[in-house]
Every structure is written in C-alpha cells, then in structure tokens.
Image (spheres, helix red, strand yellow):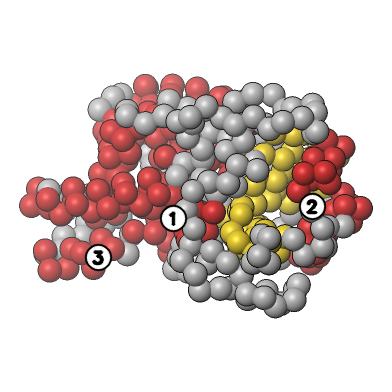
Amino acid sequence: MEAAVVPDRREFIDMADRFRPELLVHCYRMLGSIHDAEDLVQETFLRAWRSYDGFEGRSSLRYWLYRIATSACLTALEHRSRRLLPSGLGAPADDPDGPLSLAPEGTEWVHPLPGPLTTDPAALVVSRGDVRLAFIAALQHLPARQRAVLILRDVLAWRAAEVADLLGTTTAAVNSALQRARAHIRQVAPAEDDLAEPADPAHRALLDQYVSAFENADMTALLRTLRDDVALEMPPNLTWFHGRAEVGRFLATRVLAGPGVTRMVRVTANRQPAVAAYRRGHDGVHRAHAVQVLTVTGTGISRIVSFNDPGLFAAFGLAATLGTTTLGTTTLGTATPQTGPSRS
C-alpha cells in the first residue's frame, strides 16, 4: 500500500482531483455507464469532503477514495437494474429481413467508455485492467459484491484482506467470491484471444477499409473486413445477428442506403477502435446516429456494437451534425448535440 499522505483541507481538493480519471474508470466498470460513473465520482468526492476530518492518514488518500467510491457504487447498485447488451438477453435472430424487436421499456444498456481519459502514465498504470466492452458487459452479469471483488482483486490488485475489510467480510469469503466471479466471467465473456494490436499497420488498413466501404455503401468491400463469425448488436434494439451472411444481408438491405448516406468520424471507446456514424437526412444534413465499437482481430472484425443513441455523441466531444465537405475530409459542425435514442 502507498505511504500515507495527510493533506490539509486547502490541499485536499487538488490532491484528490488527480485521482478523478481512474476513479471514473473504476465506477464505470462497476456500473457499465459513463453517466452513472460521473455521478458516483461526484458523490465520492462529496462524501470524502464531508468525512475528511475522520481521515487520519492510516491509509493512502488513493486507497481511501477507492473505498468510498466502491461503497457508493454498491449502494447505487441496490436500486438499479443491471446494464447489458442484446447478446446477454437472448439468442441471435435468424431473419435479417424480419422486423427488429425493441427491448422492453426500462431496459438499461451498457454504455461505451469514451477514449483515453488521461495521458498521465501513473494513472494509466493504475487503470491497466481491462475496460474492453465485452469485459464490461460480462461484469454486469455478476452480483454487485462479486463484481467489486473481481475488480478490486484482479484489476486493481488489492489484497484479499483489504477487500474483506472494505466489504465487511472474511478473507475466505472474498477468495470464494473471486473464484465464482472468475468462473462466471469465463462463461459469459466471448473469447478475444486474436485481438489485433492498434499500432499494427494491418489493423489500421482494415479500419480504413471498413470506413471506406461503409461510407461508399460498398457491400463487397465491407464483407471482406468481417470475420465469418462476426456479430452485430444494435441497442436499443433487442435483435442482434451472428454470422457474416446474416450480418451482411441486414447491412445491405437495412443500413447501406447509398454512397454518402453515412459518414464516419473515428473515435476510441473502451480502448478499442470505434466510429461515430452520421446519417444524411432528406435535407442533406448528416446528423448523429450511432457510435460503433469494433472488435478487431488479426483475421477481421469479429464484433460490431452499434449504440444507436445520438445522446452519446456529447461524451465523445462530437457535435450533432457534420459539415458539408466531401468524403474523407469530414469536419465537425457546431450544433448542440442531440438527445434521445435512435431505434433503427
């Protein structure tokens, strides 16, 4: 554990604030939503400020803040539905030409995490645990306390005794919960052993091909970027597809309406490549439509999770509309981001 640091009240905010990015990632892992995570980080700092007189430096400030944040998350999860992806709610559809099914009202979805939250090397080391979308979605299947145990032990490398102290239980109980959590994650998280390195030229070339094919509505080129076992999910739609034939038919008949209809801006989400897709309306304006998080492997794209929610664009620093430049030289507009989910 780090050496104890006991700041006075004048120093507290500045010292605590440097832990904000990693606490945000921690709360995101627990809750599966960047918006919920932001709220819980704010609550963490408020609780820390109010109880600061009781902080006597018996532990590091960072450890103390993580204790507060984890407790706040566990309390919040008592009153919230778990967030999932469509693949966690049912089997893939077998008819790409059939109607899409919307999830029941009140269904909560996992949200993507916008790109790097910090460039501080120390914070990146602290946040070295997995934030990939598949892992975050798998975490949400766990009971809240098992989720906390897995994150604290396997991601943040806390000792079992420290986790037991936080949760008010025994070390044996923590170790047992950890084993159950690991086993469950192995069952629900898709295997991603062939992930491509982002710096690999072939990785960048594949993304170029995907974006170009999508923007030009070139189905033949798009199919070449997809693996045979590719999956396509589109929350808030409950319907999802598995397999290149099914995914390809759905995209060809329901999405790729013609060259220039869709334009894309590259972003990063969950430390994965992602694109923000804008669709052209009848007035010729390209408006925010979906954030697509891509799983790229050495043999092609294996998963596309298209979050059809324009309200997510603001979190990525993106505007609601694009400029009117030609393909390949897209510029951002300056309109206020839209709100409200898109269902198609």
Say which amino acid is labelled 1.
Answer: Val
Task: Determine whether, in the image, residue 275 is placed left or right of residue 243.
Answer: left
* Residue placed under numbered mark 2 in the picture: 256
x then y, percent, for residue 158: 38, 42
- From this view, report whether residue 323 is shown above or below residue 32: below
Closer to the observer: label 1 or label 2?
2
* Residue placed under numbered mark 3 in the picture: 15
Other residues around mark 1 within 10 Å, as few (<14) / some (14–19) / many (≥20): some
Q: Nearer the viewer, residue 212 or 95?
A: 95
Rounded to the nearest angstrom, the CA distance separating label 1 from label 2 is 41 Å
Other residues around mark 3 within 10 Å, as few (<14) / some (14–19) / many (≥20): some
Taking the image as drawn, is residue 173 in sight? yes
x then y, percent, for residue 340: 49, 48
First in residue order: circle 2 vs circle 3: 3
First in residue order: circle 3 vs circle 1: 3
Q: Quadrant of residue 244?
A: top right
x then y, percent, for residue 30: 42, 39
Q: Secondary structure at mark 1?
A: helix
The quadrant in which the C terminus is found is top right
Closer to the observer: label 2 or label 3?
2
First in residue order: circle 1 vs circle 2: 1
Rounded to the nearest angstrom, the CA distance separating label 3 from label 1 is 16 Å
Q: Residue at x 53, y 33 (%)?
A: 84
Say which amino acid is labelled 3.
Answer: Met
* Residue placed under numbered mark 1 in the picture: 126
Q: Secondary structure at mark 3?
A: helix
Q: Nearer the viewer, residue 79 or 31?
A: 79
Say which amino acid is labelled 2.
Answer: Leu
- From this view, report whether residue 234 is shown above or below residue 95: below
Residue 112 shows which numbered tag?
none
Q: Residue at x 60, y 42 (%)?
A: 343
Q: Secondary structure at mark 2?
A: loop
